[in-house]
Amino acid sequence: MKLHDVKVYPSKTPLKREDQLAWKIAGVAADKVSVTKDVTDMIINRIIDNASVAIASVNRSAPISARGQALGHPRKGGAQVFGLPARIRVSPEWAAWANGTAVRELDYHDTFLAADYSHPGDNIPPILAVAQAMDKSGRDLIRGIATGYEIQVDLVKAICLHKHKIDHIAHLCPAQAAGIGTLLGLKQDVIYQAVQQAVHVSFTTRQSRKGEISSWKAFAPAHAGKLAVEAVDRVMRGEGAPSPIYEGEDSVIAWMLDGPDALYHVPLPEPGEAKRAILDTYTKQHSAEYQSQALIDLAFKMRESIEDFETIEKIVMHTSHHTHYVIGTGANDPQKMDPKASRETLDHSIMYIFAVALQDGFWNHETSYAPKRANRADTVRLWHKIETVEDPEWTRRYHTLDISEKAFGARVEIFFKDGAKLVDEMAVANAHPLGAKPFGRADYIHKFKMLTEGLITTRESSRFLEAVQSLPRLKAGELSALNVAMPTGAVEKAKPGIF
């Protein structure tokens, strides 16, 4: 890996194309370096993971609406939509929209956290949609996904968006465009323009994850994917983009991030160096914000030492800046303490999540968020006794690039009314690569079967799992095998709209 300095240049100081971050990203995407076996295996795992959570969410409101919009754009020889028969094809940017929304809806797929945060599995829907529409092979798809993960992870390691209240899809969209460029074997100059277009159109604010969080949280990454497909399509037709998009005087860095005096150090693979960033990412065992994964596991452990939850006086979580200010009491969001809040808000409330996990000893992507569960009087009492505080050491471990030391947990102190205290901590979730029970292929398959049970047939489940595990051998035009279809009539129809 090589660190690249990225800063703002005034217009009177022209910056050579070869010195621009977008050009360097495009160079990584255009590099025909082979994908290693361990990376290929993890890509297969994440395709399984995405399919799991997408099918589980197919009949929730946001995926229904997104699918309805996609069906308004049919295309012969296009891409497929999760849940629907293989014969139904739509334009790839709309398949990216529908499938990306389904994948993101439950907040239950993979994550990477560093200077910023991300869900790199969001790269898969648009790259797969274009691969299906353009009759690409399994190996083409693998190469494209490896690039998408690499670029997003590298940007997330170096450039913080959330401190400027910019949503994380600003790193996702250029990664998706780069991945599509790799998939299609485009030249560096074409990918360069696509990356710049993707950056330009994808900077949005973090209000989507603040206050009363709405269904847009599920749509946002899919919107980035749709924009990425459109950006690549435009530049393939000869169109250009604002340049230099990162370093320009009126660029995103100058006005939306650290400003004219900014200096970032972005790591990117050297020419000929394998793209391995996916191996630094981790999926979720529980359907909740990633910073809650270790705390859910910790709640399961701590509850074994508690006989009566009513004897608890208060609970204090000592954790990272991000956990405290985004999903903790530091956010100052009253909605995070409101039993009538939306599911999207509750899965961004560590106070709610810890209370329910402590009481129940299990976590379910549906029942743990059900209104009846959230409004239970004893849960509300316990929930409102929980607070978070920032601990500098947890913040340091959250931001470190040393994977062996990185942590997303907390130290939890439970104070009882009789003066007793129970203290424990957990740095990473059990399912994390460095956790007690790291996720492997068998766990991804189990998650798929668990989430799709009763929604798809046993035959369809077996067919998909066999096909996806044969991904490197799938020939051009055979990627329709990666679609998962539900039985006839099982997919709900959307309300009418414009399309």
Image (spheres, rainbow, N blue to C red):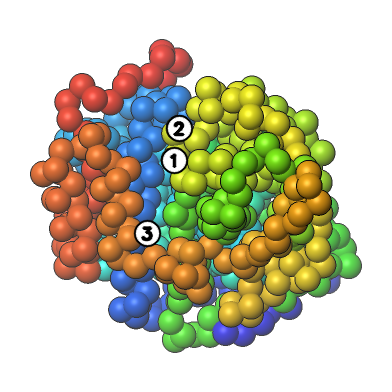
Badge 2 amino acid: Thr
Q: Looking at this rendering, what residue extends furthest in the front direction?
A: 418
Q: Which residue is drawn at 14% across and 43% down?
A: 458
Q: In this view, does 451 lie above or below 370?
A: below
Q: Is mark 2 on a helix, strand or loop?
A: helix
Relative side of 406 to 254, left or right: left
Q: Are marks 3 and 2 in contact (CB under 8 Å)?
A: no
Amino acid at pointer 1: Asn
| Residue matched to label 3 | 46
| Residue 225 drawn above or below residue 439 | above
> Nearest the camera: 357 or 128?
357
* Comes first in the chain, label 3 or label 2: 3
Three-letter residue code for mark 3: Arg
Among numbered discs 1 and 3, the one appearing first in the sequence: 3
Residue reaching furthest right? Answer: 261
Marker disc for residue 364: 1
Q: In which quarter of the image is residue 73?
A: top left
Query: Which label sits in the foreground, 3 or 2?
Result: 2
Q: Residues within 10 Å of mark 1 (few under 14, many from 20)?
A: few
The answer to whether residue 23 of the structure is visible from this angle is no
- Identity of the residue drawn at 41% across and 13% down: 496
